[in-house]
């Protein structure tokens, strides 16, 4: 009698175990699949991030200490470019970014020209120097010019700019929106709202 009474309890316990086993047979593979998907997603995301970071690593800058660039213009006069700090990009090797550049034209003459700026880019291939930010020009004869940009061709010595200029010196004051200086001929061309005051 006791065995017959306990038989339904054993049957119920067996059914519960069977149900638990069926659930575990379904749940464990699902958990494994979710884990595999999570790992695959992590590695994919890491690869994408690494791919995005790669260009930055290949565009590192090479810093130059005590950078000096020198040579001769077509008329034989020398030029010397110095900077407080210089950086060369490894993607455009001929271009050098200059911080606080100083350009001296005709240093061996009695009245060399001197130019300073906050920033500059010198292209060693074309020998073009682009200055920007608080550009100051002193022609060595007392004429001083302030502008915000200057493009200097160190081959010909020509200087030009498109962001205006204001100058003063022994002959008076002048201002204009754009300018071009030809050192070979001494000709200065100014355009746009040209104003001049001549000192007697």
Image (tube, helix red, strand yellow):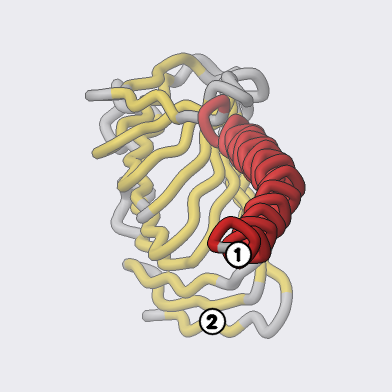
Q: Which residue is mark 2?
A: 196
Q: Is residue 184 above or below residue 99?
A: above
Q: Could you say where residue 15 lies in the image, as x and y percent from the top left?
A: 71, 57
Q: Could you say where residue 162 lies in the image, as x and y percent from the top left?
A: 66, 64
Q: Quadrant of the C terminus?
A: bottom left
Q: Secondary structure at mark 2?
A: strand
Residue 29 falls in image quadrant: top right
Please tell me which residue lies in front, 54 or 20: 20
Q: Is residue 196 left or right of residue 31?
A: left
Say which residue appears at 32% left-offset and 23% top-offset.
64
Q: Is residue 9 above or below residue 32?
A: below
Q: Which residue is mark 1?
A: 9
Q: Quadrant of the N terminus?
A: bottom right
Please tell me which residue lies in front, 200 or 165: 165
Tell me if I can see residue 89 in this picture: yes
Say which residue appears at 55% left-offset and 53% top-offset.
150
Verify CB contact (< 8 Å) between mark 1 and mark 2: no
Q: Is residue 10 above or below residue 61?
A: below
Mark 2 crowdedness (10 Å alpha carbons): few <14, some 14-19, many ≥20: some
Tell me if I can see residue 52 in this picture: no
Q: CA distance from mark 1 to mark 2?
A: 113 Å
Q: Could you say where residue 55 lies in the image, as x and y percent from the top left?
A: 62, 33
Upstream in the sequence, badge 1 or badge 2?
A: 1
Please tell me which residue lies in front, 101 or 164: 101
């Amino acid at each position: 009698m006791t065995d017959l009474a306990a038989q339904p309890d054993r049957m119920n316990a067996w059914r519960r175990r069977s149900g638990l086993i069926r659930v575990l047979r379904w749940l464990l593979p699902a958990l494994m699949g979710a884990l595999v998907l999570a790992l695959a997603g992590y590695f994919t995301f890491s690869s994408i991030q690494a791919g995005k970071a790669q260009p930055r690593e290949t565009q590192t800058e090479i810093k130059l200490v005590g950078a000096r660039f020198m040579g001769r213009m077509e008329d034989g006069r020398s030029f010397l470019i110095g900077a407080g700090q210089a950086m060369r990009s490894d993607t455009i090797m001929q271009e050098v970014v200059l911080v606080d550049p100083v350009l001296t034209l005709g240093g061996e003459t009695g009245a060399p020209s001197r130019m300073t700026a906050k920033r500059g880019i010198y292209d060693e291939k074309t020998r073009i120097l682009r200055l920007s930010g608080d550009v100051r020009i002193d022609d060595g004869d007392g004429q001083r010019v302030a502008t915000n940009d200057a493009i200097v061709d160190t081959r010909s010595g020509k200087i030009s700019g498109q962001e205006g200029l204001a100058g003063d010196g022994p002959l008076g004051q002048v201002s204009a929106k754009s300018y071009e200086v030809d050192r070979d001929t001494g000709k200065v061309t100014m355009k746009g709202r040209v104003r001049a005051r001549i000192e007697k």
